[in-house]
Image (spheres, rainbow, N blue to C red):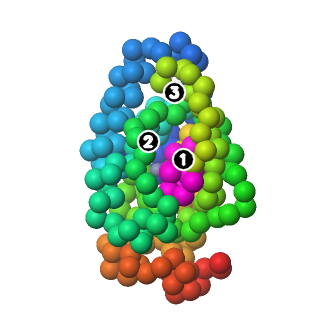
Amino acid sequence: MEIIQTGDPVLRKVATPLAVDEIRSVSTKHLIEQMRDTMRAAPGVGLAAPQIGESIQLAVIEDRSDYIKDISSEQLATRQRLPVDFHVIINPKITIVGETTLDFFEGCLSVAGFAAVVRRGASVRVEYLNERAEPITITAQGWYARILQHEIDHLNGTLYIDRMQTRSFTNIENVDRFWKSRTIEEVREDLGIDG
Ligand code: ZN
């Protein structure tokens, strides 16, 4: 499926919660399969329903081990990035746990070709329903916590560009050229971003 790009009003709407019978419907099952395939084809680590034009409170998440195999162990450690199995979150409620924040470059399939430093909570708790409408509560840290914050933002009409350190906004080519190999402290210093 085509991923909707920034500027489309559907990305700015608060998405509608799903009822239990809707969650268990055949059409939602098909939608989840299509979203999973679209996320993997992109590839991306998350996809929210508004990004394919469905203004409903549903997102899919998956951070595969083959996505991170070429990232240095040092980078993975600073990002607290570990593989996350495919799962579906429906009608999520998110709470940031604690005061600790982490700054890292982040991108979005709906703002294709760009990235920016986004400050996110280091730890979150999320209550949601899974694809069988069973209530689940998870706590997540690091990169997985960032993915959850990013996807749940989508369900509330918020994009990372609303939260980014604006001076860090860059195209992907220049992330690789200038910023990828630097620590986030060096990035912040070079760009004049307060710590
Ligand atoms: Zn996104």
The amino acid pointed to by label 3 is Asn
Query: In the rendered image, which residue does mark 1 sit on?
Result: 148
Residue at image position (42%, 65%) is 76
Query: In the rendered image, which residue does mark 2 sit on?
Result: 61
Q: Which residue is more in the foreground, 189 or 126?
A: 126
The amino acid pointed to by label 1 is Leu
Measured Cα–Cα span from mark 3 to mark 2: 12 Å
Residue at image position (28%, 53%) is 66
Residue at image position (33%, 66%) is 71
Does dot 2 land on a helix, a strand or a loop? strand
**Percent coordinates x, y for residue 146 in the rendering:** 54, 54
Of the numbered discs 1 and 2, the one sitting upstream in the chain is: 2
Q: Give the range drawn in magenta.
A: 141-152
Measured Cα–Cα span from mark 1 to mark 3: 14 Å
- Viewport quadrant of the C terminus: bottom right
Q: Is residue 107 visible?
A: yes
Are discs 1 and 2 less than 8 Å apart at CB?
Answer: yes
Query: In the rendered image, which residue does mark 3 sit on?
Result: 130
Main SS, magenta residues: helix
Q: Confirm if mark 2 falls within 8 A of ligand 1.
A: no
Measured Cα–Cα span from mark 1 to mark 2: 8 Å
